[in-house]
Amino acid sequence: MSKLLKTKKFIFGASFLTVILVLSILNTVVNDGKIRQVQFVYNEDGSLDKAPPYPPFDVFLFGSDMYGYDMLHTVIEGAKYSIGIVLIVAFLRMLISIVLSYFLFRVPERIFKLLKAVSEPLSFFPQTLIAYFLLATVVMYTIHGFHHPLWVRVVYEFIILVLIALPALTVQLIEQKRLVWKEEFIESAITLGGSKRHIYFKHILPQLYEEWILMFGQQFLQVLTLLVHLGVMLVLFGGTIMGEGPPSSVTHEWSGLIGLNKRFMLAYEWIVYVPILFFALTALSVAMINKALSDFFSHKDMVRKNKGV
C-alpha cells in the first residue's frame, strides 16, 4: 500500500480531488457558499472602466461570467455537487449490481443467456438519450413551475442515472463470477462441503474485488461524461429553470455551467472553457488513480505468483 501512495499518478489524482473538494466544502461552511462578484470597475474619477464579463488575468485569474462572478470561485463552489453526484451514482451502480449478481450468477445457463440477450442491446444504445427522454419532462421548469419538489427531482434523477447502467453492469459482474465459479479451487471447496455463501465470500470476492475497484473508477468516468452530455442538452441535475430569461440551474453544478453558458462559446469562450477544464482535470485525476491502482494490483499479483513458484 505504501508503494501505491508514493506513485506520482495516484498522488496527483488524489491530491487534485481532495483539494478541490475541501475548498468547495470550506466555501460553503466558512463563506456560506457565496461567490466573489465584481459588478463594475470604476476609475478614480468615478467613470466606468470595466464591465463584466471580465476576461482571464484581468479582474479574476480565470475571468468572470456575464454577471461578474469569479469563474474559478464558481467552479470550486460547484465541485462538491458535481463530484459528489458522480461518486454517489457510481457507488450505487456498483453496489446494486454486485448484490443483483450475487443472486443471479448461479441461474441456469438458458436464463443467463436470456438476461444477456436483453442487456446487450441496451449497452449499445446511448445512455444519454435514454436519460434525456426519461428526465426532461420531470426536471424541466414549465410556465406552471416545477411539477415536483426538489427532493423528488433529485431522487428521481439518481434512480434513472443508476438504473440505465444496471443491466449491462450486472451481466458483466455475473460473467466474472461464473468464470471464477468454474475454477478448480471452487470445485474443491464444493467437494469439501462449502456453502454458496461461504464460497462466495471466502473464494470469489477475493478474486474479484480488485477488478470491482477499477470498475468503480470506470463508472465514475462514465457518469461524469453522461452529466456533461445532459448539461449540454439543458437537462440539469435538480432541475432546469426555463422562463422569459435565459435558462438557469437549481444546483449550479459543473454540467449546468457548461450547458447554460454554451451560447457564449464564440464571444466569451472562457465562461465555457473553465468548467470544461475542471471536468477534464477531474476525469484525468480519476483515470490516473485507476491506472496507479491497476499497476499496483498487477505488481501484487506478480509478487504473489513468484512466491507461489
Image: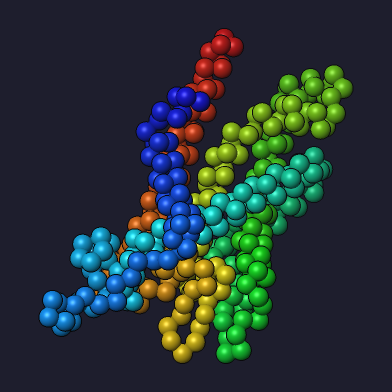
Q: Residue at x 44, y 41 (%)?
A: 14
Tell me the residue at 51%/25% (across/down). 1
Q: Position of residue 159 (x, y in %)?
A: 67, 62
Position of 163 with respect to 143 (left or right) is right
The quadrant the C terminus occupies is top right
Q: Residue at x 76, y 41 (%)?
A: 102
Expressed as whole percent of the image width and height from the top left, the position of residue 8 reads 37, 33
Taking the image as drawn, is residue 264 in sight? no
In the rendered view, tell whether residue 175 sits above or below residue 48.
above
Residue at left 57%, top 70%? 238
Q: Residue furthest right?
A: 193
- Please state the horizontal and vertical placement of residue 61, each as a whole percent of the image: 25, 60
Decide which of 110, 94 is in the foreground and name it. 94
**In this orientation, which residue lies closer to the viewer: 203 or 140?**
140
Instruction: Say how the picture is coloured.
Output: rainbow
Res. 246 image quadrant: bottom left
Q: Given the current orientation, which residue lies at the most extreme left position?
A: 45
Q: How many marks?
A: 0
Q: Answer above or below: position of 54 versus 307.
A: below
* Vertical arrangement, residue 225 with respect to residue 292, above or below: below
Q: On the picture, is 97 further left or further right than 217?
A: right
Left or right: 224 in relation to 172: left
Establish if 288 lies above or below 309. below
Residue 185 seen in this snapshot: yes
Residue 57 position in % (x across, y down): 21, 62
Choose between 194 and 139: the one closer to the eye.
Answer: 139
Quadrant of residue 201 in the image? top right
